Amino acid sequence: MARRFLVLWFRHLTTDWFLLHRPALQETPFVLAAPDHGRMIIRAANVIAQAQGINNGMAVADAKVLVPLVEVLDDKPELPAQLLKALALWCIRYTPIAAVDLPDGLILDITGCAHLWGGERPYFKDIVTRLRSSGYDVRGAMADTIGAAWAIARFGRMTPIIERDGQVVALYPLPPAALRLEPANLDRLKKLGLYRIGDIAGMPRSALRRRFGKELLLRLDQAFGQEAEAIESVQPIEPFQERLPCLEPIRNAGGIEIALTRLLETLCDRLQKEGKGLRTAIFKGYRVDGGLVQIAIGTNRATHNVPHLFKLLQEKINTLEPDLGIELFVLEAPKVEDLSPLQEALWGGACGLEDVGLGELLDRIANKMGAGVIRRYLPDEHHWPERSTKPAGSLLEKAMTAWPDDRPRPIHLLTKPEPIEVTAPIPDYPPMLFRYKNKLHTIKRADGPERIEQEWWIEGAKHRDYYAVEDEEGARYWLFRSGHYAGIHTSQWFIHGFFA
Amino acid sequence: MPATKEDIIMQLRKDILLLQGFKPTSVSVIDVGLGPVTHAFPNAVFPTGAIHEFVSTGAENAAAAGGFVAGLTGALMGSGGACVWISSGRKVFPPALKAFGIEPDRVIFLDLKREKEVFWAMEEALKCEGLAAVIGETPEIGLTVSRRLQLAVEQSQVTGFLLHHNPRHLNAIAAVARWKITPLASTLSEGMPGIGFPRWNVELERVRNGQPGTWQVEWSAGRFHPVVPELLALPQLEGSQEQRRKTG
């Protein structure tokens, strides 16, 4: 899947923080300074100070000449890292992967997140306006690569949202500083008169490597999306995995069961603490001879019930071949879902499809005989009886339409209608007699016809005229004639079901 | 206040049942609406939390038994219950269950291949306390397996229905009752066209601590209605006697 990134740039990160904590500074020019070789050097200046000509890296004495009233505060060197970490954690609400980009930025991997806010534009607007309203002067950009987003956030003049595969066009007019290069390389580019990325990008790669080293090419590739770039999220997504190394290789089922119980207990304990349940589990055994044996189970609903999961896995333990022995057991839960805590019922009783016990029963059956044997049906809007039901996707899927009950339907339906011989008096009248499996049935009562048309898009299909009939012994049948009446011998009659 | 004669007799009957080794199977009483048929059972209570056996031969009788069981299950499921229908070679048409008071999407069908799997699934399902009923379709069942099922329901109080279609031979099994359901001709008032409500001849062949007997039951307006013989029209009475001669 194509990835998307959002880079945020805090232009006055530390001074904004000071303003938030000391609102009295709002109107005054102030700088943050730190001692360096016996001089006080400015590390950051607020907007007012910058407007009056004070820049980062100036000595405080020089700044006081320019602006006599400037307020000098002590810089806190660890402040940017702390602030960015807190801001990245705040951004977890927008995406699970948010990384700190020192000294003054954040990188968010927003792949597959923006549609939850109704598209990239509202998503972007939401993040930026919220950060701005909380007092941080922030700029941002979205692109397919981190490099491009970084460049547009800091140097972009046009739109902050770069369309898919649009980074090349967007980056060409920007200065080389947008490529995150070393100062030495930047100076060299400037000396050579290369002021735009577009000037560099067209040059032969070997020439660029000789003059500027590997760094420039790497940064170019990263910006244009030819080289992958990894970021480290502030909140790493920890896999649900437990390991159990064994002192002695395990060779018997009893030992494997003990290992399984221990792993399940620790894993389920963690799942329970985080309010989650697993849907699939893989139990792996690494053998002494380097082989890998594994068993996998799936459950119908999220669970962290140790005895239940143990039972599911236990049935498959005999398919594991320990051979010379298993020295490491690993239990993984690749698919984990949130599990809402259940209210314990005070009086047990029939509690329907939501019942946990039923879910566990179906897990055991699916585990032993395959999920295909479990069927649940929902009404489907087709008149044709064979097509009037559809299999339900999950245990809790609700019926979208009500079950029709205006027409009588037989309790037993033949999967394939069977032909019968019939004597019918007049067209469109129920038959008088029919012969099914060499037994003659005299019809005493009949109801019908109920005409059921085949779907119109099926060409040449015949409709069916259904009759519910009762014979002299009281047995009730569902018969139909396929197509129109066409004489005694040419009409096709079938039996399709048995009424209760 | 001195106890009346009926009360004393009722109490004595209950005592005799207990002496005979009868254990009331379930705590709660669910009225399945069978009326006089329930009087065949001890204490005139339809036993839930037990195994019922239904024997049928022929496709027509199998459908009748299926409908009757669906009616019972519908009453047991109430508004929110769920049931499991286990079979190999299923014929039940889910939309038809709606007429018997069951929401068809509350039924979970297990279509298994072998008889052994049906027994295993049935035992596991009967252990599941959240279910209203478990229906199992097999040609027959052995005594040992039936005792295992019986033990499961004693623990979980789930009602089990065993549908035996075309049994090779009838074993004595650990079920609370053996039923035989055959279809009866429906009745309509004179001159009305069409087919009336489903009507069955319900025969209790064997009841533990109870009285076997034969009744006629009709399914209409969403519940069982016992057919009172006095109200039957004369030709129908003859018909049913003929029926009895045939079956007996």
Image (cartoon, coloured by chain):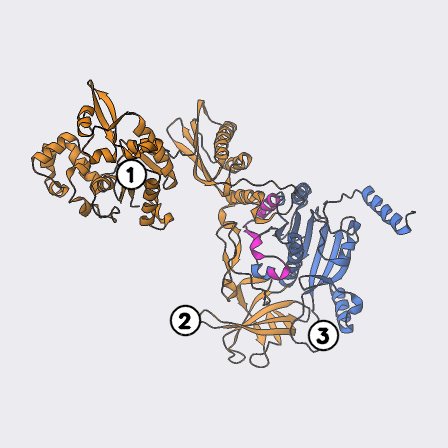
Chain colours: A orange, B blue
Q: Marks 1 and 2: in contact by CB < 8 Å?
A: no
What's under tag 1, amino acid-wise? Answer: Asp
Query: Residue B113 colored magenta?
Result: yes
Q: Secondary structure at mark 3?
A: loop
The residue positioned farthest toward the right in the image shown: B2
Instruction: Say which amino acid is labelled 3.
Output: Ser
Q: Residue furthest front?
A: A69
Q: Circles 2 and 3: CB distance less than 8 Å?
A: no
Q: Which mark is residue A459?
A: 2
Image x and y of residue A111, in percent:
32, 44
Q: Chain of mark 1?
A: A
Report the span colored magenta: B98-125
Specify the quadrant that holds the C terminus of chain A: bottom right
Tag shown at residue A343: none
Kindly identify which chain the residue marked by label 2 belongs to.
Answer: A
Residue bearing mark 1: A137
Q: Amino acid at mark 2?
A: Glu
